[in-house]
Amino acid sequence: MQTIYTDGIANITLIDGIIRMDLVNITQVEQDKANIRQVAALAMSLPALLRTQEQLSLAINKMVEDGILKKNDTPQAANNSTFS
């Protein structure tokens, strides 16, 4: 099995019932703008995307319960995380 590290996801599209997204890494940050590089692509069905979202939500909730993450109720810009 191959492990791919990614800093995030870009270019999410829905084509013929398949969600496609680019996995990207930040290569450097210049003047508050991140330069990104595509490292892989991910494709999954809509049901798989919904299952993935549920699994991620459960994992995040567990990390909040364990004190690893702290929910931030203050709305933030789209580029910022809502957890710290």
Image (cartoon, rainbow, N blue to C red):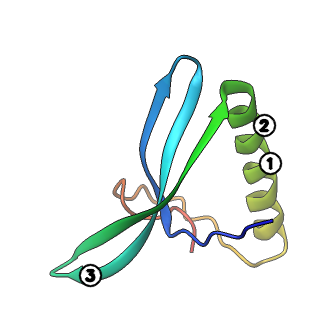
Q: Secondary structure at mark 3?
A: strand
Question: Looking at numbered disc 2 in the image, what kind of residue is underneath it?
Answer: Arg
Which of the pair 75/2 is nearer the observer?
A: 2
First in sequence: mark 1 or mark 3? 3
Question: Looking at numbered disc 3 in the image, what kind of residue is underneath it?
Answer: Val
Q: Residue at x 74, y 78 (%)?
A: 68
Q: Quadrant of the N terminus?
A: bottom right
The residue that mark 3 highlights is 29
Query: As drawn, is 82 to the left or to the right of 63?
Result: left
The dot on residue 51 is 2
The dot on residue 55 is 1
Question: Looking at numbered disc 1 in the image, what kind of residue is underneath it?
Answer: Gln
Which of the pair 49/23 is nearer the observer?
A: 23
Q: Residue at x 78, y 77 (%)?
A: 67
First in sequence: mark 3 or mark 2? 3
List x then y, in percent, for residue 25: 44, 71
Q: Is residue 79 above or below residue 22?
A: below
Q: Secondary structure at mark 1?
A: helix
Pick out the residue farthest to the left: 31
Q: Residues within 10 Å of mark 3 (few under 14, many from 20)?
A: few
Q: Is residue 44 above or below residue 62?
A: above
The dot on residue 4 is none
List x then y, in percent, for residue 26: 38, 74
Using the numbered discs, state the Cα–Cα distance from disc 1 to disc 3 in whole angstroms.
31 Å
